Amino acid sequence: MTEWTRVCSISELPEGSWKVVDVEDVLIAVFNVAGKYHAIEDICTHDGGELASGKVEGCEVICPRHGARFCLKTGAALTPPAYEPVDVFPVKIEADSLWTRDDRWD
Ligand code: FES
């Protein structure tokens, strides 16, 4: 099983904010949406754009490049031009910090 990587302290990720962490060369974007934390790979499946700085509406992020929407809970591609989902990752809270890991190869 892969190791957990510390993202930041809880206080550093207030509601409506996001942070990107490098987990063994995989960029994972962690969002705080209304007090719930969601982690997705920071690569749009349409054309490789980064997603973290995209506008968040509800529990969806909009790719800043061409406007595809992704569900932050499931990674599902909700609108063209993206059709493939982004990978999602677990988030845990421990010792006042947020942690994530790339569990795709467990
Ligand atoms: S790179 Fe994200 S919609 Fe095109």
Image (cartoon, rainbow, N blue to C red):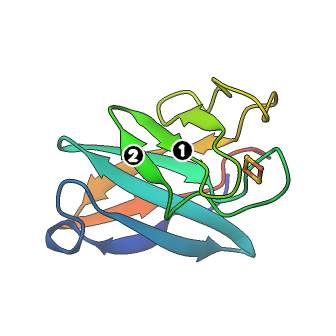
Q: Picture quarter containing residue 28?
A: bottom right
Quadrant for the C terminus in the image = top right
State the SS at label 1. strand
Residue drawn at (49%, 43%) of the image: 61
Apparent side of residue 78 relative to residue 104 in the rendered image (left or right): left
Q: Which residue is mark 2?
A: 56
Query: Would you place residue 37 above or below residue 43 in this image?
Result: above
Query: In the rendered structure, which disc, 2 or 1, sits on the residue that comes first in sequence?
Result: 2
Q: Which residue is mark 1?
A: 62
In-front residue for pair 6/28: 28
Residue 24's tag is none
Separation of marks 2 and 1 at Cα, in angstroms: 6 Å
Among the 4 quarters of the image, the one containing residue 101: bottom right
Residue 8 pos. (x, y %): 32, 75
Examine the rendered structure and indicate whether residue 24 appears above or below residue 74.
Answer: below
Residue 95 locus on image (x, y percent): 20, 67
Q: Residue at x 75, y 29 (%)?
A: 80
User: Label 2 is placed on what type of residue?
Assistant: Val
Task: Give left or right: position of 91 versus 95.
Answer: right
The reply to whether discs 2 and 1 touch (Cβ–Cβ < 8 Å) is yes
> What kind of element bears circle 2?
strand
Badge 2, how many Cα within 10 Å: few under 14, some, many 20+?
A: many
Q: Residue at x 74, y 44 (%)?
A: 104
- Horizontal and vertical percent position of residue 4: 51, 63
**Amino acid type, residue under disc 1 in the picture:** Ile
Q: Residue at x 71, y 49 (%)?
A: 66
